[in-house]
Image (spheres, helix red, strand yellow):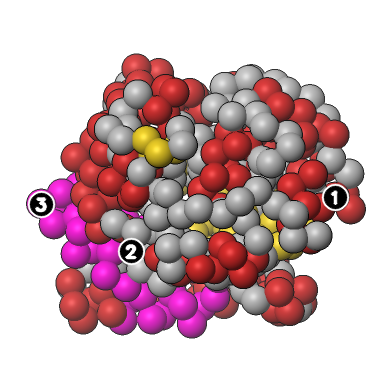
Amino acid sequence: MSFGSLKIGKYTIEKPIVQGGMGVGISWDRLAGAVSKEGGLGVISSVGTGYYEDKRYSKKLVDGKPLGEANFYSPEALKAIVNNARKVCGDKPLAANVLYAINDYGRVVKDACEAGVDIIITGAGLPTNMPEFTEGYPDVALVPIVSSAKALKIICKRWKGRYDRLPDAVVLEGPKSGGHQGFSYEDCKKEENQLENLVKPVVEEAKKWGDIPVIAAGGIWDKKDIEEMMSLGASGVQMGTRFIGTHECDAHDNFKQVLLNAKEEDIELMGSPVGYPAQGIRTNLTRLVEKRQGPAIKCISNCVSPCKRGEEAKVVGFCIADRLSDAYNGNLETGLFFSGTNGYRLKEIISVKELMDKLIKGE
């Protein structure tokens, strides 16, 4: 089976593969730029941009960490990341992922538009007011992430009624993805919530609103998986974890090694201050957290609103901004390493070009 292109708004993605946005610093300019250059859609994560290039764009640090959301989500750093990605991919379509649960969501969406991205992808909550923040940027395509047909219907009704527009595409994420899930712990395991059972109802809902392209995500690993999703009606796929296994991935070499060393049983769901279960690799940090011996929790970066300035971090036992930034810096003792359920299948580090060839040709 050969794959056609993927249309998102006015943009044509030559190969129907979207690289998942991964923060802090796992998908920045090098990875996103390389994926777009190779004909996929590279996605820059807007999370923790204050750490970019050794925090040079953070105007104020406390204990070596960007202070508050203004520095943690640095507009200057995001612009620099987009500019550097453009040096790699030129004018090919380039996206940014902006989590709905973050503090300053609207401002960060505007920052992404001003930085020159073509497409904005948003998950971690239902972005019912997303179009509000892209006024003045009619060419920027908007792509919400959903986990059900019902969620897509709510977004379409709200957007159509309030803004007279619809999503340019939708990412449907099943419970095998890395990082935060759109389901409760119990619902992640239910058969009806597995990606292969969600695609058809979401595609049907999308057709009611004018054939919105559906991009399937969560646990997709190879050409066979892509073919399965396309046969169910998806127009494309999103893959995150597989791209960590590339030379261009912005993650620290230690992060890549954690993934290479992981066994299937090491990848598990855990609590998160974001208010959703998150999928990651069992490491020294998770063992410390279980014993309530994790690093001290001080809310310096004020990254996500559901955390309530560190209150939820104290409940789950870790600060997500600090622990993800530790992983970005390669700290094996206190880093939080997200992975999809198939992360253990990663056996080598290859180039983005090699990976894209494997996914398209099935070699």
Which residue shows up at 35% across the image and 24% down it? 56
Identify the element where label 3 is drawn: loop
Residue 245 is inside the magenta segment: no
For mark 1, what is the residue?
266
**For the residue marked with disc 3, what is the amino acid?**
Gly
Q: Which residues are magenta?
A: 128-157
Distance of label 2 from label 3 (alpha carbons): 17 Å
For mark 2, what is the residue?
167
Measured as percent of width and height from the top left, residue 76 is found at: 25, 32
Q: Considering only vertical position in the picture, is 173 above or below 18?
A: below
Distance of label 3 from label 1 (alpha carbons): 46 Å
**For the residue marked with disc 2, what is the amino acid?**
Pro
Q: Residues within 10 Å of mark 3 (few under 14, many from 20)?
A: few
Measured as percent of width and height from the top left, residue 27 is found at: 51, 35
The nearer-to-camera label among 1 and 2 is 1
Identify the element where label 1 is drawn: helix
* Drawn side of residue 138 relative to residue 273, left or right: left
Q: Residues within 10 Å of mark 1 (few under 14, many from 20)?
A: some
Identify the element where label 2 is drawn: loop
> Count the marks: how many?
3
Measured as percent of width and height from the top left, residue 65 is found at: 44, 38
* The one of 180 and 4 positioned closer to us in this rendering: 180
Which disc number belongs to residue 136?
Answer: 3
* The one of 147 and 356 positioned closer to us in this rendering: 147
Which residue shows up at 19% across the image and 55% down it? 134
